[in-house]
Amino acid sequence: MGLDLQNERNLTMLTDFYELTMSNGYLESGMDDKIGVFDMFFRKIPDGGGYAIFAGLEQLVEYMNNLRFTQEDVDYLRGKHIFSEAFLDYLLHFRFTCDVWAAKEGEPVFPGEPVVIVRGPVIQAQLVETMVLLTVNHQSLLATKANRVVRAAAGRPVMEFGSRRAQSYDGAILGARAAYIGGCAATACTIADRDYHIPATGTMAHSWVQMFDSEYEAFKTYAEIYPDSCTLLVDTYNVIKSGIPNAIKVFNEVVIPRGYRPAGIRIDSGDIAYLSKKARKMLDEAGLTDCKIVASNSLDEYIIRDLITQGAKVDSFGVGENLITSKSDPVFGGVYKLVAIQEGEHYIPKIKISETVEKITNPGFKQVWRFFDKDTHQAIADYVTEFGEEVDTSKPITIFDPNATWKKQTLENVYAVPVLEQVFAEGRSLYTPLSLQQLQNYCLEQVDHLWEEVKRFENPHRYYVDLSPSLWRMKRDLLEKVNTF
Amino acid sequence: MGLDLQNERNLTMLTDFYELTMSNGYLESGMDDKIGVFDMFFRKIPDGGGYAIFAGLEQLVEYMNNLRFTQEDVDYLRGKHIFSEAFLDYLLHFRFTCDVWAAKEGEPVFPGEPVVIVRGPVIQAQLVETMVLLTVNHQSLLATKANRVVRAAAGRPVMEFGSRRAQSYDGAILGARAAYIGGCAATACTIADRDYHIPATGTMAHSWVQMFDSEYEAFKTYAEIYPDSCTLLVDTYNVIKSGIPNAIKVFNEVVIPRGYRPAGIRIDSGDIAYLSKKARKMLDEAGLTDCKIVASNSLDEYIIRDLITQGAKVDSFGVGENLITSKSDPVFGGVYKLVAIQEGEHYIPKIKISETVEKITNPGFKQVWRFFDKDTHQAIADYVTEFGEEVDTSKPITIFDPNATWKKQTLENVYAVPVLEQVFAEGRSLYTPLSLQQLQNYCLEQVDHLWEEVKRFENPHRYYVDLSPSLWRMKRDLLEKVNTF
């Protein structure tokens, strides 16, 4: 499950410096044992989409399992001359004891609801903020983007081809992982196959073709080495006049006589709609109706949708920089906010005020429920409650828009499923790793349960994320109390 | 110099799968000893800027120094059932023997000129393609973006605050490194300080303030722990009515009585122009004229420029997601192309044709020269020559636009400096690591040598990258020979 990659690296120190100054402050002011509850949530879905795909949990669990400060870390921090010896000693003997809840990888998630909750001593819960956000933001961004691209391809396989344009090494490797969860069929990234078992694929670059005196000779040599998996790149010189005729010649002279069928041709430049139709015709006329056409030139979900609308004859798509960086919207804006402090048996809810209404946080220690229709299993709405609050679907439930309470809806014939599962109990992992294939299957199934209107690329229907009445009252009361300026 | 991070990880397998199929193909077809020359270059400067900043070389050198395939790698590849045993054995005993030239980190570089050249057995030069591009693309992207932001700040320090929104772990860590080369003064990323000695900075988040019963108590507690470096976050509730009055009170009650001066306040939301002016006035009236104001709310080079134009009283800027992902243009589009094959003593130039003129490659084994004015030391133009071609600046030199040869310019009173330096000779590193401070100094000095017109954010003057007459003729002859369809 790719544990090696993380075990080799101790990422405990990948934390914002203020997490350390605050943690030292909590200890110095005797607040280190205070139990806080922090929510990770996001406010905006990338690309204006209707849902995001949650991802990165496995790496987050590995990070939390491996949390430890080395003597070198502590010596380095001592050199800053601002941390107390008591704090440095605390770090040297650091043991993670928080409770953590999280959505499942591959789960569709929505703005305003917690997707990760960390409850524990504030000194610890504060320290993990940066890595909770960094890990989940990155992989959720790419799983969300990949899912858009995969839906645009309407059943045709999408291959992640972006390593060379990724934002650094993990950007490529874990990006390929997230893209697979979102629905990609394969990657070009070899190490992602070795470590995460994502099928790696790839045949030749233009340099292979240029290396030979002629395109024909380049194709022929390649076909002799790989007769059983021969996909030829046909656009080094001229697709129609040279690339496809040479490919057909080599398929007939080398591949077929050895008892194989040609795997495919790849087109990496030019007008893919025009060229693929022309290529299909030429291949079919040569009797190579089973030879696939792969396209790979600055593709994204919009271009793929357009190509299909225009009748392009493409069997699979290789998508590079636009996917691996989520180029059109490269930030998943998850935030991590204190929502409650435990006092004895009770939680004191905490709120962060903002002049922008959407930026006001939802206070309290919470759970998220998803309502599904009992007959169609369509997801109807998410319902955020206090943690431990009972959700009784045996009777009709009235839900309302928290920002416009007159917008009500009464749900009948539904069942409720908790969105967040506990993954750490007092620092012990409860997490069971699943294969990436299982995570992808889960993602695609759950997206199937969303209404088509929520899945539109442009102006999708806003999926409801409502608050339970008691949570809504808690927020209103806090707002009225705080807003006394 | 951060070598630990890389030594812990073997990134040899971070390569596109087709590099391996091609390399196996070169070996199988007896071409593995053929010497090829590959150029990395780019076609477009991010954000429509006038120059890019080259970065990532140190990590590229570390990667090349550490290139090796483990028994596990070879076993994994054997399981694909497409590689020959001879190739797998070759990998097991792999030794890097290429020559490599590269620009210096921090160097302004321009479209169409090589920034990295790899010369060596094609089987090896092909294998490193993915990592050459991935490493240089990512860090050059962020050094370029950081340099824009730093220039907008016009002398005010810029702090890189984006770890939580970075595209994965190296995106944060090496992103902070590249941002420092581009001119940032500090980072929030602790591990980047530990490993790369980039000053890490940070004080408190909103959660610190929320953790206490009142903002005043939160500030007071913090000031008691950090009286000598006390920067207070003043926007948790209301900057003007609560945050600044509480900060002033605590500075007067806790910081000053202990013999320190208040370090600063930070504003992280709202209208920074309005709030910072108001805050400056309040602080000044309280006699705290030396208390700095830090701003940090979704900033980028345009917002910072506008804030300064509007007279915002900001002393330093914390820049997050817009910098660490280069959000407005998150891809540096470097490519890696075969430009020549060695035959005996000679080089056979190679070209990649495209219907788009700018996508046609410059063939041949090359060097890049930069002409500077002897009196002003302004950079006038880059001049791409054949490798070993003499550039004689003792006489006037006429340069011309390679795409519009009637556009000529005769240079006098100039000197020429080679842009590319050799960093590997037959696989042995010639690279001398420099401190990040030295790289930043170099970057800022070299940017100073560019004309103001080249440094404009919008529609900058296009800096000349011209070809020597013999290189231009080589390209023309190849184009005429190839384009026979």
Image (cartoon, coloured by chain):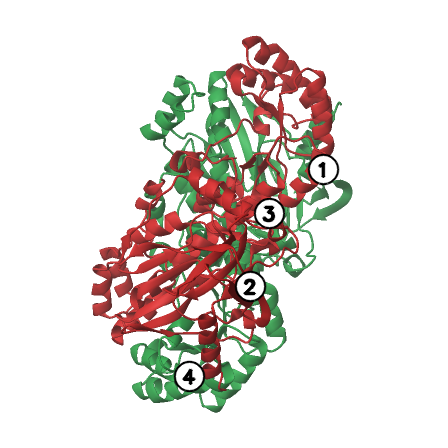
Chain colours: A red, B green
Mark 1–mark 2 Cα distance, whole angstroms, equals 59 Å
- Circle 2 sits on which residue? A410
Quarter of the picture holding the C terminus of chain B: top right
Label 1 sits on residue: B356
Location of residue A169 in the rendering, given as x and y in whole percent from the top left corner: 44, 44
* Circle 1 crowding by C-alpha within 10 Å: few under 14, some 14–19, many from 20: few
Residue toward you, B458 or B221? B221
Residue underneath mark 3:
B370
Query: Circle 2 marks a residue in which chain?
Result: A
Question: Mark 2: few, some, or many residues within 10 Å (few <14, many ≥20)?
Answer: few
Q: Viewed as shown, does residue A245 lie left or right of A189?
A: right
Q: Which residue is mark 4?
A: B247
Marks 3/1 same chain: yes
The answer to whether residue B270 is above or below residue B192 is below
Q: Is the residue marked by circle 3 packed among few (<14), some (14-19), or many (20+) residues within 10 Å?
A: some
- Same chain assignment for discs 1 and 2: no
Q: Secondary structure at mark 3?
A: strand
Q: Is residue B484 above or below residue A97?
A: above
Q: Nearer the viewer, residue B168 or A276?
A: A276
In front: label 1 or label 2: 2
The residue mark sitting in front, 2 or 4, is: 2
Task: Name the chain under label 3.
Answer: B
Q: Residues within 10 Å of mark 4 (few under 14, many from 20)?
A: many
On screen, residue B149 above or below A326: below
